Image (tube, grey):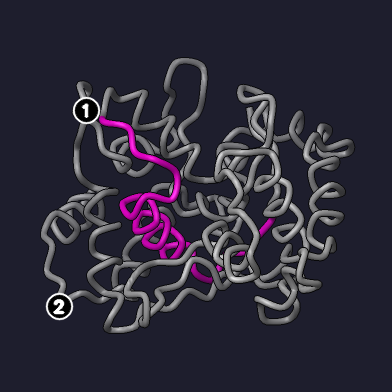
Amino acid sequence: MKILVALLVVFSVTLPALADPEADRLAFAEFYLSRFPSIELQAHKDGAYALDQAKREQWLEMEDFPPYEIAVDEGELLYARAFDNGESYAACFDQGGLGIKQNYPYFDIERSEVITLEMALNLCREKHGEAPLDYAGELMGNLTAYMAYTSRGNKFAITVPPEGLSAYEAGKQFFYERRGQLNFACSSCHLQSAGGMLRAEILSASIGHATHWPTYRFKWEQIGGLHKRFIECNEQVGAEGLAQQSPAYRNLEYFLTYMNNGMTLNGPASRK
């Protein structure tokens, strides 16, 4: 309880000049280690399945024939397809774009904004004269599923340069700020109430929230990105909806992913 109070005190004040992301991350990790002492931090990459053994066993059986498998195959074909000018996605990314998801999102100093992997893909398309993809569409989901698959086993290594502190702080504030008719924050469910029940579902810990995207959710009947989940959460608490890849959601992803630094990527994944 003392750790939770300390976290809420630290994170309730926005002080960009004094921001210390690494101190934040260590406090974040310590909270979950204290709350779930029998669960290793890395295990939270599996979300709620780290907290319920029966559901975990069902999920592992489902992973023998994962519902995102087709998306990965389709994404590989899309990624290899040349643009009209003869170039391809590989020309826009380090390592040809494979095994790099752990580096996203990042703060682009020249553009003065957070760049997510989805945004980077559309910037690549625009650079080569191609129309941008719908962020909520199947093609974007397939592309990111393939790129995530090639990054499995890598660990997040997000950095926050001095120029990116304000974006990091904005994302942190969004995570802890209450909103909507229910007056809930992201932290209300996934920090304060993590491990508890919401209707018939166990509330997962935020310490693993960035590791497994994009995800095939049976509720959606398709693969989708982290921002689709942000939108859904906002709607559930009766808050104002924001578009995928809006600055607020990109900043939130930046904060959450930094909090997951050192954790292993295991996307794409499947969830209820």
Residue 115 placement, left or right of 272: left
Q: Mark 1 or 2 closer to N-term?
A: 2
Q: Residue at x 84, y 56 (%)?
A: 76
Q: In 3D space, how far apart are the residues under numbered discs 1 and 2 (Cα atoms)?
A: 29 Å
Q: How far from the left and from the top, in percent, is residue 167?
A: 28, 66
Q: Secondary structure at mark 1?
A: loop
Q: How far from the left and from the top, in percent, is residue 268?
A: 70, 49
Q: Is residue 249 magenta?
A: yes
Q: Secondary structure at mark 2?
A: helix
Region of the chain picked out in magenta, as a range? 240-266
Give 123 or 22, whichever is nearer the viewer. Answer: 123
* 237 to 162, vertically: above or below: above
Residue type at tag 1? Gly
Per the image, the residue denoted by label 1 is: 180
Q: Residues within 10 Å of mark 1 (few under 14, many from 20)?
A: some
Q: Nearer the viewer, mark 1 or mark 2?
A: 1
Q: Residue at x 50, y 49 (%)?
A: 209
Residue 18's disc is 2
Mark 1 in CB contact with mark 2 (< 8 angstroms) = no
Q: Quadrant of the C terminus?
A: top right
Residue 72's disc is none
